[in-house]
Image: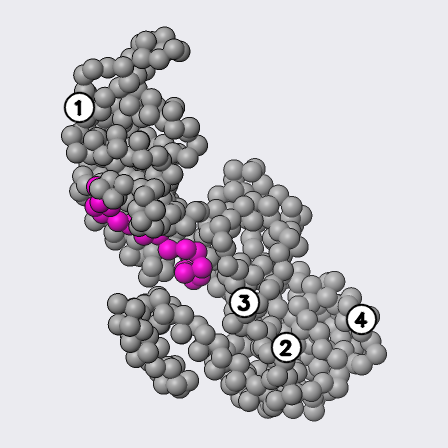
């Protein structure tokens, strides 16, 4: 069953008609109430996903009932029905908290579409609330948040590499959590009691970076008035994290290569080398292989740092984690910003899940903080963060289907969506159906069933790999 609906109308024929037609169409349970008073009684003993109610009823009208529902059941989705020509009443209902309205007489297909959307809203809200209730350490790994298959693999890799003392290279787009990953590896390693020293390589000019990393002796250069201990010495016994190592110059690369090979550093102006016991973790958002081909990155240095690679997925590759991350960020930043606890509205959550997030988790965090600051109530809405629902191209319904019967239009849209979505999965996995299923959170048999239904063949994607090779 897709959910449960309570229909409220004083016209018995309308109640029976809607019950008979909506139950099979929406695959849901439909209860009916002939008055607002009866509906309110039912809501005290049974929960519903959606209330569909007429505005004009004898006794207590739909607007009065709506106010009482929103007072006692603020998260319940309510759709109002109103007679043609009474749009002002429907607008008033929206102001009082109704999710949507539809005018009588209505087309059956139009009603079904509106109610499907309303039920989706209820389901998303319930999932959102459930996530907030369940949210805890089971979805947080060393401050990294996510339960997707992609993140589970990251967690497993972190645990594996943390046990070793080998050099790690973390790759991923900006904002994917490379710093948190480096800290997680250190925290789980035998070096966890010692120092973790992070260096943001691009933020330090080259002529200063060398002295910061390796230190210098008094008199090594004009302003060297005293000895300075470098960051490698500060990290002795622990871990040094070289963030965005793809931006350092070949000169610094050469000196770091010596550290990796000889386990020693040479401060500026010091004729003697100093042994250091430091684990190196590096990160980059760049494609180092391409930089090697352009002679911008030393190949021998690359292979020295790329001993244990850890790749972090982009946020758009693990959309199922977005509600978890968003709720975690709201909880965290409400405390940091000294704000009362807030929650994300279903409408905003839908936008967050569908957004591309070029800046990944960092961009999402900025949006969440903006919402916490600008929202006036206990719920963060799209207008609070300046976002609106912009469907992804693959989800848009083309105008050519608008003149088709509902079922045919729906089937055509689904066919195009699945061709695009599953085609992308198979492109990424080079035709590996098992891997594609894991990436999208489906069982292999379920994905194969969808592929058979829509005539999608994995073979061309495997053949494409052979051609490329």
Q: Which residue is mark 2?
A: 114
Marks 1 and 4 sit apart, C-alpha to C-alpha, by 80 Å
Q: Nearer the viewer, residue 323 or 130?
A: 323
Secondary structure found at label 4:
helix
Q: Residues within 10 Å of mark 2 (few under 14, many from 20)?
A: some
Occupied quadrant, residue 240: top left
Q: Is residue 308 magenta?
A: yes
Q: Which residue is mark 4?
A: 89
Q: Residue at x 31, y 9 (%)?
A: 218
Secondary structure found at label 2:
helix
Question: Is the C-beta separation of discs 3 and 2 under 8 Å?
Answer: no
Q: Which residue is mark 3?
A: 392
Position of 304 compared to 450: left or right? left
Foreground: disc 1 or disc 2 = 1
Q: Nearer the viewer, residue 27 or 179?
A: 179
Question: Is the C-beta separation of discs 3 and 1 under 8 Å?
Answer: no
Which quadrant is home to the C terminus? bottom left
In percent of width and height, residue 74 lies at 62, 61
Task: Tell me which segment is drawn in magenta.
Answer: 303-321
Q: Residue at x 38, y 47 (%)?
A: 286
Mark earlier in primary sequence (1, 2): 2
Marks 4 and 2 sit apart, C-alpha to C-alpha, by 18 Å
Residue 224 appears in the rendering: yes
Marks 3 and 1 sit apart, C-alpha to C-alpha, by 55 Å
Q: Height in image: 384 above or below 26?
A: above
Marks 3 and 2 sit apart, C-alpha to C-alpha, by 20 Å
């Amino acid at each position: 069953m897709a959910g449960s609906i309570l229909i409220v109308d004083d016209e018995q024929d309308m109640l029976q008609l809607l019950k008979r037609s909506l139950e099979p169409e929406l695959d849901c349970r439909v209860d009916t109430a002939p008055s607002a008073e009866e509906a309110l009684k039912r809501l005290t003993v049974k929960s519903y996903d959606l209330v569909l109610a007429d505005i004009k009823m004898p006794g207590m009208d739909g607007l009065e009932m709506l106010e009482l529902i929103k007072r006692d059941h603020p998260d319940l989705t309510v759709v109002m029905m109103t007679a043609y020509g009474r749009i002002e009443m429907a607008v008033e209902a929206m102001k009082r908290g109704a999710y949507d309205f539809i005018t009588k007489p209505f087309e059956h297909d139009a009603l079904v579409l509106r109610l499907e959307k309303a039920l989706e809203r209820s389901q998303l809200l319930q999932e959102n609330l459930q996530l907030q209730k369940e949210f805890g350490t089971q979805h947080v790994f060393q401050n990294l948040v996510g339960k997707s298959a992609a993140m589970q693999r990251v967690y497993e890799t972190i645990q594996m590499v943390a046990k070793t003392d080998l050099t790690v290279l973390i790759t991923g787009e900006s904002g994917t959590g490379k710093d948190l990953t480096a800290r997680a590896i250190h925290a789980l390693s035998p070096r966890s009691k010692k120092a973790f020293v992070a260096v943001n390589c691009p933020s330090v000019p080259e002529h200063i970076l060398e002295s910061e990393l390796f230190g210098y002796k008094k008199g090594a250069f004009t302003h060297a008035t005293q000895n300075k201990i470098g960051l490698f010495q500060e990290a002795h016994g622990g871990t040094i994290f070289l963030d965005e190592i793809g931006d350092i110059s070949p000169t610094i690369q050469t000196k770091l290569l010596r550290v990796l090979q000889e386990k020693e550093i040479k401060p500026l102006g010091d004729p003697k080398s100093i042994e250091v016991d430091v684990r190196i973790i590096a990160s980059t958002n760049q494609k180092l292989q391409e930089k090697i081909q352009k002679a911008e990155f030393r190949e021998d240095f690359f292979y020295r740092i790329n001993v244990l690679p850890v790749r972090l997925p982009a946020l758009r590759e693990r959309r199922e984690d977005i509600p978890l991350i968003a709720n975690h960020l709201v909880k965290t930043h409400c405390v940091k910003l000294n704000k009362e606890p807030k929650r994300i509205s279903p409408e905003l959550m839908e936008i967050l899940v569908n957004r591309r997030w070029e800046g990944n988790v960092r961009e999402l965090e900025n949006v969440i903080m903006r919402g916490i600051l600008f929202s006036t109530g206990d719920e963060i809405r799209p207008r609070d963060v300046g976002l609106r629902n912009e469907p992804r191209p693959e989800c848009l319904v083309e105008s050519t289907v608008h003149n088709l019967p509902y079922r045919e239009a729906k089937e055509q849209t689904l066919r195009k969506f699945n061709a695009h979505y599953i085609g992308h999965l198979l492109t990424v996995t080079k035709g590996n159906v098992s891997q594609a299923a894991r990436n999208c959170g489906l069982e292999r048999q379920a994905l194969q069933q969808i592929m058979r239904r829509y005539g999608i063949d994995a073979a061309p994607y495997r053949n494409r790999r052979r051609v490329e090779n």
